[in-house]
Amino acid sequence: MELEKAFAMMQQNLGSALPPVMDKIYRQDPGLFANHLMDRQFAKPEGGALDERTRVLVHLAAAVASGAEGCARAMAHRGRAIGLDREALLEAVYIARFAAASKVLEDAEAVFDELE
């Protein structure tokens, strides 16, 4: 797919929720934009094992957990566009929160070792 069509499709799917950095990358470094599109196809293959709703929720949770605000906004928007309800989107956030809290506990293992 040519880059211009791919970017137009991204704009159509995400509208105002398109992270501003994607426009900048598309205009300033088309090679990086093309690479990002290839990564997307790797992460979200057509006909993959997960349906679109599940993919969006996983992507949303990963974006929230990693602090990718623009990506989280885009996935929340995409989720609403494909019919995900409030409860599903919030559950993804809760899962991300739990994963982040679990990481804090794992990072504190040295403290717990010291307390033994």
Image: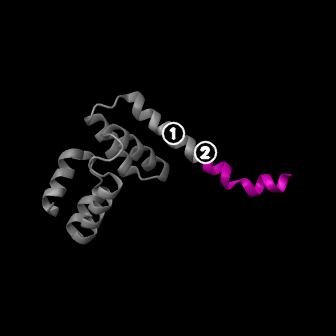
Closest to the observer, 100 or 53: 53
**Number of numbered discs present?**
2
Numbered disc in front, either 2 or 1: 1
Mark identifier at residue 63: none
When asked about the image quadrant of residue 35, the answer is bottom left
As shown in the figure, which amino acid type bears the numbered disc 2?
Ala
Q: How far across and how far down the image is residue 91, in percent?
A: 46, 33
Task: Say few, some or many: other residues with alpha carbon within 10 Å of mark 1 (under 14 / 14 to 19 / 20 or more).
Answer: some
Residue 84, placed above or below residue 9: above
Quadrant of the rendered structure where residue 78 is?
top left
- The overriding secondary structure of the stretch rendered in magenta is helix
Which of the two discs, 2 and 1, labels the residue nearer the N terminus?
1
Q: How is the image coloured?
A: one colour
Classify residue 103 as left or right of residue 33.
right
Where residue 92 appears, as percent x and y from the top left, is: 45, 38
Query: Which label belongs to residue 101?
Result: 2
Q: Is residue 115 located in the magenta-colored stretch of the structure?
A: yes
- Indicate the quadrant where residue 25 lies: bottom left
Residue depicted at 48% across the width and 53% down the height: 66
Where residue 62 appears, x then y in whole percent?
45, 49
Q: Where is residue 38 in the image (x, y as percent from the top left)?
A: 28, 62
- Direction from residue 1 to residue 59 in the image, left or right: right
Dot 2: element: helix
Amino acid bearing label 1: Ile
Region rendered in magenta: 102-116
Residue nearer the viewer, 9 or 28: 9
- Badge 2 crowding class, 10 Å Cα cut-off, few under 14, some 14 to 19, many 20 or more, is few
Q: Mark 1 points at which residue?
A: 95
